[in-house]
Image: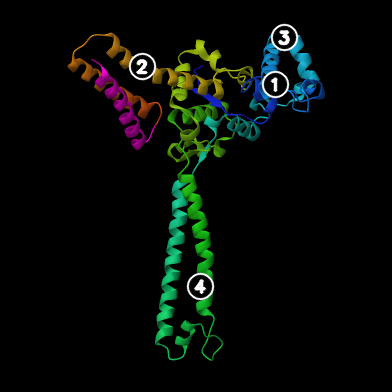
Amino acid sequence: MQSFGVRNRGEGRAGRTSGELEGSDSGSTPAPIPSTEEDSASVPEDGETSQPTVLWRNFIAKLLFFRQSEREKKEYNARQGYNKFVYDYAHDVPEGFPRLAAWLHSNDNWNIYRGFGSLSARVLVNLEIELTKLEQKILDLDKADEAHPRLKFRLNGYENFAEYNEEQKKNVQKAQKLLSEYFDFLLKYCQVRELDRPTKRNFYGFYNWMWSQGPLCKDKREFMYHIDDFVSAYKHSEKSTRLGDFMERRLDKWPCLRWLFQTDRDRKKSKNKYVIHYSTYHLKTFAKVVTVCISLAILLLPVMLLFLIPMSRASMAWLVFGFVMLFSMVVSSIADAKTHEVLIGTAAYAAVLVTFLGNLK
């Protein structure tokens, strides 16, 4: 059986509590938190113990907790009530609509839905046509009133005279309702248009699971074939990192490294070996560590080369040029910076290197 290509990570789901967040982002063993009278008895209420002392005590308590045996951890979790937590897993719910809904909710990368872009545009066009006709009708009636010796007073707000009727008033009220409907729909359409499109990898992960698992009957899954009309409910452009996404793709080919980016909770989310969840916290931590290492290397490596290796002025200039180019490419690709941010960062980096180069004798 071939892999579905479903390799994604998940944000926190229902069932995560503050007890878990203290220990890991999705692990099943929460860290101790002074939430009972027994745990908080060591911290006096009169404020005599300083905050750093309390933090050190909590840190030491966590270290001691993780050094405990599994039996001691289970006893602690039972005493704190952590063993009563309920976690929602897609494989625990009935097949069909319940499992499909649970599976879509289990991971942000699979939380994609149709945007119905063409249909929405058609509704807007129909409303535009109807409003345009009504607008012209109101203008024609205004011109007719202007030419009438008595009805022209209706344009000034006069009412209840002999020739007066409610036709124009009804037209304006109808236009008001249509405009309200039109603007509400237009704003919602714009909001949907601003949602991120799912990546090709995420869409095929969703499609392969739908195709292989078949949670819906044939005539109920026609929506999944419209590949260009899906939007993601998760803003990847704001919350995800390019390094994290790159690492997820690499883990498809390097399964031996998956354990580094998973917790016990992530492994329990799926019983299907082709459906793999990764820890968002671990992926973001990896991305931050790599980013820091690259930043230090780009900043310090040219300085060390210029300072330690004898070279001509021309070689120094070309070295600075090469590292400035490398810096701008790294900032624009890894950090996903905007154009003006790349320009400002590159100018500052170049100024540092040029200043250092000018001070060399």
Earlier along the polypeptide chain: callout 3 or callout 2? 3
> In terms of image quadrants, where is residue 321?
top left
Q: Which mark is residue 68?
A: 3
Nearest to N terminus: mark 1 or mark 3: 1
Quote the CA–CA distance across marks 2 and 1.
Answer: 38 Å
* Res 30 seen here: no
Sequence-earlier tag: 1 or 4: 1
The residue that mark 1 highlights is 54
- Mark toward the start of the polypeptide (2 vs 1): 1
Q: What range of the chain is rendered magenta?
A: 337-361
Q: CA distance from mark 2 to mark 4?
A: 70 Å
> Helix, strand or loop at disc 3?
loop
Could you tell me the amino acid type at mark 1? Val
Contact between marks 2 and 1 (CB within 8 A): the answer is no
Where does the image place residue 244, in percent across and percent down from the top left? 47, 23
Please determine whether, in this image, residue 336 is positioned above or below residue 124: above
Viewer-side label of 3, 2: 2
Q: Disc 2, disc 4: CB below 8 Å?
A: no
Looking at the figure, which quarter contains the C terminus?
A: top left
Q: Looking at this view, is 288 or 298 the one in front?
A: 298
Q: Nearer the viewer, mark 2 or mark 4?
A: 2
- Dot 3 amino acid type: Gln
Give the labeled residue for mark 4.
172
Nearer to us in this view, 111 or 98: 111
Q: Nearer the viewer, residue 288 or 60?
A: 60
Q: Position of residue 30 (x, y in %)?
A: 69, 20
Q: Give me the C-alpha separation between circle 3 and circle 4.
A: 75 Å
